[in-house]
Amino acid sequence: MKLMVMDGQGGGIGSTIIKGIRKSVGNDIMILALGTNSIATSGMMKAGANKGGTGENAIIQTCKKVNFIIGPVSILFANSMMGEVTPLMASAVSTSKAKKLLIPLTQEEVCIVGITKEPLPHLVDQVISLIKEEFSNV
């Protein structure tokens, strides 16, 4: 099973996700850190990812090869994260056959109706529960 964690800017959300997965699931899962920039990738690598890639082409190619894509919901929005998510990146994520586990945090002018505001650690716990559930089905 391969998980792709995608983040931009400083990589804080992605790093938190990776740390949580490693703490809960251990090293049995391959985690690929994909950053829109090198700082985000570096932060996620330090958090425990197995491999990392940076930029548009790395993201586009990796989306084709993973079982799960995890990140903030803004990875689906072209030009989000202050323009770091390119239209091609957003398209690659949204059209990938991988299951998407998206955290409803965004700085964009988007309001997802029906979502309650939870702190990031609680949202990461929910992501980990979903991964464990899927991992037991493999």
Image (cartoon, helix red, strand yellow):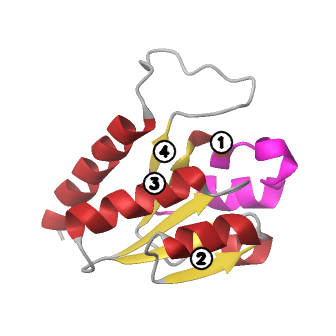
Q: Residues within 10 Å of mark 3 (few under 14, many from 20)?
A: some
Span highlighted in magenta in the image = 75-100
Residue at x-position 77% and y-position 53%: 85
The answer to whether 60 is drawn above or below residue 104 in the figure is: below
Mark 4: give few (<14), some (14-19) or many (20+) Cα within 10 Å: some
Mark 1 and mark 2 in contact? Answer it, CB < 8 Å. Answer: no
| Nearest to the observer: residue 2 or residue 25 | 25
Q: Describe residue 26's horizontal placement relative to residue 79 as left or right.
A: left
CA gap, disc 1 and disc 2 = 18 Å
Q: Earlier in the sequence, mark 1 or mark 4?
A: 1
Vertical placement of 89 versus 64: above or below?
above
State the mark number for residue 74: 1
On the image, which quarter does residue 122 sit in? top left
Q: Earlier in the sequence, mark 4 or mark 2?
A: 2
Residue 58 position in % (x across, y down): 70, 78
Q: Position of residue 135 (x, y in %)?
A: 21, 66
Residue where numbered disc 2 is placed:
62
Q: Is residue 61 above or below residue 129?
A: below
Inspect the image, locate mark 3, and give the three-letter code of the amino acid beneath it. Thr
